[in-house]
Amino acid sequence: MPDLQKLLPPPMRRPPKPGHPNGAGNGDAPAALKNGDEPESPVTDNPGKRLTTGVKDAPADLVGWVDERMGATSFLTAMLMRKIPKGTNWFYTLGSATLFAFVVQAITGVFLAMYYTPSPVEAYASITHLTNDVFLGEFVRGMHKWGASVMVILIFVHMARTFFFGAYKYPREINWVIGVVLLILTMTMGFTGYLLPFDQRSYWATIVGVNINGTGPLVGPYLSDFLRAGPEFGATTLQRFYAIHMLLVPGAIIAMIGAHLYLVVKMGTTAPPWLRADRKPKESRSHEVDAIANGDGANGSSGNGAAS
């Protein structure tokens, strides 16, 4: 390995201000010049000592070097060390489980794309070759196929938990809207991926689904033409579905997940509704105690007595 002392530059020194005793202004000359000695050069004199000092000042710490420029420690600290409300249970892990299911879908989808051919003639043959001939191909395809159903179930249960726990209310309305968008994107991803094997079942099921989309108001016919890549199913329809499934929808999901996690860290999580219901009477009693301690209760009672 190369010597770090030869790679690291000498540390920079800030020049003294004019008028400073060691400067070149109206102040006195440096002590070395008063005594008639030669000034020590900050660059050439004793280079070994200066390089050793530079190595101590700037240790070769790759993690610290990256963290200093990206500031990842503060983000991870805010996300992992945030306060969790009392009563947090396993229902609060549904979002993390959905995120894990998406990561599995992304990883297995990358490996499937290495062997898949988005062509009406070769699509089914590439899937058959992947399942029967490629090492662990059937296992990876099974994880991707059943993982899609698991992700849809998890995101539905996660949103149901958010709704029944009242976590969509102020100030988390934007996060709820992002969750609805993520649900729509997840369904779109499942719909576009269903056609990719291009067998009889996926072909006719996709035709039915696109025709149902065409019955929607205003944007329905345009959406169907966009999905078919034309007025009717053709050779470019499969390529359109493949591009949406592999590029468009995953990119949008990653962006929405980033915004969703940011708001979760910023806003925090809500306590279960039964704990919030138990806390309300205690809060009201504490306000009454504070009012009596401040003399409001005494004034109120005397006023009532005078009025009666």
Image (cartoon, grey):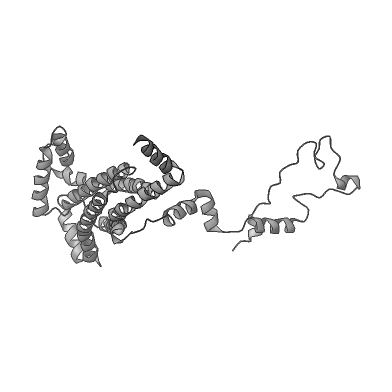
Residue at horizontal 42%, vertical 57%?
80
Residue that sits furthest to the top in the current view = 218
Residue that sits furthest to the right in the current view = 35
- Left or right of 245 in this view: 41: right
Counting from the top left corner in percent of width and height, residue 272 is at 30, 55
Q: Is residue 232 above or below residue 53?
A: above
Residue at horizontal 51%, vertical 53%?
67
Q: Hey, which quadrant is residue 181 in on the image?
A: top left
Q: Quadrant of the C terminus?
A: top left
Does the rendering let one see residue 264?
A: no
Observer-nearest of 174 and 206: 174
Q: Quadrant of the N terminus?
A: bottom right
Looking at the rendered structure, the number of numbered marks drawn on it comes to 0
Counting from the top left corner in percent of width and height, residue 61 is at 56, 59
Observer-nearest of 53 and 272: 272
Residue at horizontal 25%, vertical 45%?
180
- Left or right of 291 in this view: 270: left
Residue at horizontal 22%, vertical 59%?
150
Q: Is residue 136 above or below residue 235?
A: below
Residue that sits furthest to the bottom in the current view = 135
Q: Hey, which quadrant is residue 218 in on the image?
A: top left
Observer-nearest of 137 and 101: 101
Observer-nearest of 90 and 6: 90
Counting from the top left corner in percent of width and height, residue 43 is at 74, 50
Q: Hey, which quadrant is residue 125 in on the image?
A: bottom left
- Left or right of 248 in this view: 237: left
